[in-house]
């Protein structure tokens, strides 16, 4: 764009903005001498194939001394600029509305799991309670198995003790049978001795009877000799001797029998005591072993249940961690997309704001021109308009400097310069 101050008849033209657009029509302003014949011709608009920017190319402006025509041209251009500004403001409002709708849609679409947390926590509590119930059931089953094994071991122990007692009873019966046989042997010996005693008595009586018969048939010859032998006394002494002998033998036999019985009974008592002591020790050792086995099985079952609970807990937390990682990954992707969109919108907004600022500066320059100043030095950078708001890129900038000095309504000096910056 080019700004003009009041001047004498003069003309200048702008150079091409570069080689980015070719074969396009230009916009020119022509002013005749004395202000007559001023017109504006608008040529074809330059469209950039990639950025979508609109540039004015080969802008030829010929202004004569007619300030009214120049101001009219400037007013027309100002109206065009204002229309562009209005369009850009509408586009800005549309973009802001789209940004707000995008933020709103993103906010609404964002996943909110807070409503499900109570249900999830309730289900987790139920799962933990069910797990504890299962663990208690498993422990009760294990305890029942251990109790059954305990009763089985007790039964086996009692059965072994019963068998041992039966074996002891059988041994004692054998000992009793031996003692019975010994007693019968002693009784038979006693009967034999009694029969021998009876036989001795009978023989003695027979002998005594024969002696009496012999003595009764003999002649009683009295011989003056010593004292007569008393046969009755002798027989009595013999009988007493044999009776004493029999009593002694009986007593010795009874003492021998009693000593044997006492010896056997003492041995049986000692063996019974040793056997009972051994059984007691065996029972205590079996009880200790059983207790340790029960404790070992209980610890093993507890270890198994704890390992199962640990494995289940690890799997549950691994699943939760995987879900949270997926959620975090999704949120990071959404955040990255949101940041990219924000950067793009910021860039668009910055470019639109820059265009608006430049337009405002140009409008202020127009107003200052309309107010009228005698001496002015204007530096203006033409504005590139954009067809596509999504592609806001400055392509070419042309700077025109016009300097005029007017004294008493006459132009004393005038100079201009232009510069194209790609």
Image: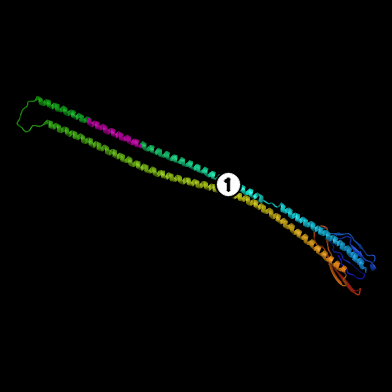
Q: Which residue is mark 1?
A: 129
Depth order, front residue of 385/45: 385
Residue 240 appears left or right of 328: left
In front: 310, or 405?
405
Query: In the figure, 89 relative to 125: above or below?
Result: below
Question: Is any atom of residue 422 visible in this view?
Answer: no
Vertical placement of residue 284 versus 102, above or below: above
Residue 232 horizontal/vertical position (percent): 12, 30
Report the residue at 82% width, 64% height from top.
Answer: 360
SS at circle 1: helix
* Residue 175 is one of the magenta-drawn residues: yes
**Residue at the extreme front:** 371
Give the image's coloring scheme. Answer: rainbow
Asked whether the viewer can see residue 378, the reply is: yes
Residue at image coords 28%, 33%: 185
Quarter of the picture containing the N terminus is bottom right
Give the farthest residue toward the top. 217
Residue 134 lies left or right of residue 101; in this view the side is: left
Q: Quadrant of residue 69?
A: bottom right
Q: Is residue 29 magenta?
A: no
Query: Magenta span covers which residues?
Result: 171-194
Residue 42 image point, x, y percent? 90, 61
Q: Determine the residue positioned at 50% across, 42% down.
A: 144
């Amino acid at each position: 764009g080019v700004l003009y101050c009041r001047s004498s008849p003069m003309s200048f033209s702008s150079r091409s903005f570069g080689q980015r657009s070719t074969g396009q029509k230009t916009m020119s302003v022509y002013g005749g001498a004395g202000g007559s014949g001023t017109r504006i011709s608008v040529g074809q608009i330059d469209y950039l194939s990639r950025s979508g920017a609109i540039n004015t190319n080969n802008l030829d402006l010929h202004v004569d001394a007619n300030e009214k025509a120049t101001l009219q041209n400037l007013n027309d251009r100002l109206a065009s600029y204002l229309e562009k500004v209005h369009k850009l403001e509408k586009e800005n409002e549309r973009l802001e509305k789209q940004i707000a709708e995008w933020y709103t849609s993103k906010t609404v679409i964002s996943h909110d799991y807070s409503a499900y947390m109570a249900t999830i926590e309730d289900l987790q509590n139920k799962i933990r309670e069910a797990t504890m119930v299962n663990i208690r059931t498993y422990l009760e089953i294990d305890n029942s198995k251990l109790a059954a094994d305990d009763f089985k071991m007790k039964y086996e122990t009692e059965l072994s003790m019963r068998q041992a007692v039966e074996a002891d009873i059988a041994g004692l019966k054998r000992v009793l049978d031996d003692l019975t046989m010994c007693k019968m042997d002693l009784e038979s010996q006693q009967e034999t001795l009694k029969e021998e005693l009876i036989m001795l008595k009978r023989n003695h009586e027979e002998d005594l009877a024969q002696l009496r018969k012999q003595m009764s048939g003999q002649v009683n010859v009295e011989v003056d000799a010593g004292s007569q032998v008393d046969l009755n006394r002798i027989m009595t002494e013999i009988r007493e001797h044999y009776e004493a002998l029999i009593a002694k033998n009986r007593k010795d036999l009874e003492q021998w029998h009693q000593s044997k019985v006492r010896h056997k009974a003492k041995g049986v008592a000692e063996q019974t005591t040793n056997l009972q002591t051994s059984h007691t020790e065996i029972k205590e050792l079996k009880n200790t072993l059983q207790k340790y086995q029960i404790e070992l099985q209980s610890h093993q079952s507890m270890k198994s249940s704890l390992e199962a609970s640990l494995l289940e807990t690890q799997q549950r937390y691994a699943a939760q961690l995987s879900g949270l990682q997926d959620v975090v990954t999704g949120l990071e992707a959404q955040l990255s997309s949101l940041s990219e969109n924000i950067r793009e919108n910021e860039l668009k907004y910055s470019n639109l704001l820059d265009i608006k600022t430049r337009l405002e500066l140009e409008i202020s320059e127009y107003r200052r021109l309309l107010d009228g100043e005698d001496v002015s030095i204007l530096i203006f950078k033409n504005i590139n308009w954009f067809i596509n708001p999504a592609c806001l890129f400055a392509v070419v900038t042309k700077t025109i400097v016009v300097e005029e000095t007017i004294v008493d309504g006459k132009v004393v000096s005038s100079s201009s310069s232009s510069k194209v910056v790609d």
